[in-house]
Image (cartoon, rainbow, N blue to C red):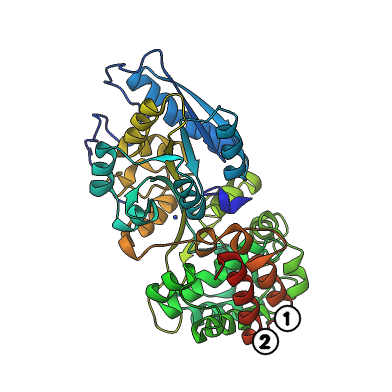
Amino acid sequence: MMRRRTTLLTSCTALVLALGATACGGGPVTAGGGDKALSGQTVTVAGVWSGSEQENFQKVLDAFSEKTGAKTQFVSTGDNVSTVVGSKIEGGNAPDVVMVPQVGVLQQFAKEDWLKPLSKTAQQSVDANYADVWKTYGSVDGTLYGLYFKAAHKSTVWYSPDALAQAGVEPPKTYEEMLEAGQTVSDSGLAAFAVAGQDGWTLTDWFENIYLSQAGPEKYDALAAHELKWTDPTVVEALTTLGKLFKDKQLVAGGQKGALNTDFPGSVEKVFGPKPEAGMVYEGDFVAGVAKDQFGKSIGEDANFFPFPAVDGNTAPVVSGGDAAVVLKDGKNAEAGMELLEYLATPEAAAVWAEAGGFLSPNKKLDLASYGDDVTRATAESLVGAGDSVRFDMSDQAPAAFGGTKGAGEWKILQDFLRDPSDPKGTAAELEDAAAKAYGN
């Protein structure tokens, strides 16, 4: 499931990094100069990553090993992190470090008393290297448990430069301009958007970007915590805005039925595959990886993005996701695990994966020159530049029964809304009923 793979320009400036390496381009970054203080110890790390993500994270772990002498072992959990980790704790085989992909799961782990607070060294790095919002999302009841190492920028609209050029339109600056550009693209022979309605999580991301821009960050935070009801007029307004796009058969490839039969990889294929059906696809920065790896597109030339545009003259949204490193109390080598977190908090560690590709870091001290292409640099610059206005994916903050279950809760209700967007008030009422059950209030 791509959302959990979190499923967001300058010349190189000889940035001296916190642990003594340099992140500027050229050769690979290594964590040299360590004292091998952890020789003979093994740190076990669990996370959702597999494939190229796991391979690239292993490069970070190898750099840590080179610096400290520790061995590392990575265990891929699949998407159900909480179940896998819980069973390992019960079986007396807890990993030392877990890369947690959801705020809600981090909060669950903390409430189960499974986590060690971050060390003073790690906390100092977070204070120095991260916007406060990342500290907020890594904390529970004022205690910092999670270090956000990998981020996703979920406010990017990806497009075919050829499709927009043939239609004679430029990347839009406002939501209204985006719909107008979409109509022009449609008049030129392609649908405007490929919408991955078969995957309900993509529809939550559509809603969240519109809602954050239209209602603002305070309302967004309140709705994410269910301190604001889903029947609030701001929710109805955002659904109405989204419904105008969903019901327009010129804008959505295959219409509503076609969208409901399109999964996320299929939506990218409809724009960047061999037989394009649409000019644009909305989703996070990870669209680039699919366009490049599966369809051979050159990012920046054959595929590019523009920021999700501002709605109704408000501020453009920046919605993010991310993976937070936490240390388990029951891990056999929790102290060495905390030293890994201290390393992950440095720009040096982020630079290792940034050079490998397929990665964004919320660490503002990472030199943007570490990224391998201009498009990724621009995405990272947008994410870091947003500072404390970044908001974490709302459905990832919710109980899984509401915000993260296939065929249920928000995913199912928004799929029903895509099928028939004629009653935003009714949809808002359904969302509130489901949220109230999941949150228990």
Considering only vertical position in the picture, is 294 above or below 382?
A: above
Figure quadrant of the C terminus: bottom right
Q: Nearer the viewer, residue 439 or 8?
A: 439
All told, the count of numbered labels is 2
Task: Determine the residue positioned at 48% across, 68% down.
Answer: 224
Identify the residue at image location x=55%, y=27%: 93
How far apart are the alpha carbons under marks 2 and 1?
Answer: 8 Å
Kind of element beneath mark 1 = loop
Of residues 284 and 232, the one nearer the viewer is: 232
* Closer to viewer: mark 2 or mark 1: 2
Q: Position of residue 376 (x, y in %)?
A: 43, 50
As drawn, 410 above or below 140: below
Q: Secondary structure at mark 2?
A: loop
Local packing at callout 2 (Cα closer than 10 Å; few below 14, some 14-19, many 20+) is few
Where residue 81 sits: x, y (%)?
58, 43
Residue 26, quarter of the rendered image: top left
Q: Which mark is residue 423?
A: 2
Instruction: From the viewer's perspective, tell me whether residue 298 is left or right of residue 30.
Output: right
Q: Residue at x 59, y 62 (%)?
A: 403
Going by the numbered disc 2, the residue's amino acid type is Asp
Q: Give the labeled residue for mark 1.
A: 420
State left or right for residue 142 relative to residue 425: left
Circle 1 packing at 10 Å, graded few (<14), some (14-19), many (20+), is: some
Task: Kindly indicate whether the residue at mark 1 contacts the one at mark 2 (C-beta within 8 angstroms).
Answer: yes
Task: Indicate whether 71 appears above or below 345.
Answer: above
- Does 420 sit above or below residue 50? below
365 to the left or right of 158 = left
Q: Position of residue 440 (x, y in %)?
A: 57, 67
- Is residue 120 shown to the viewer in this render? yes
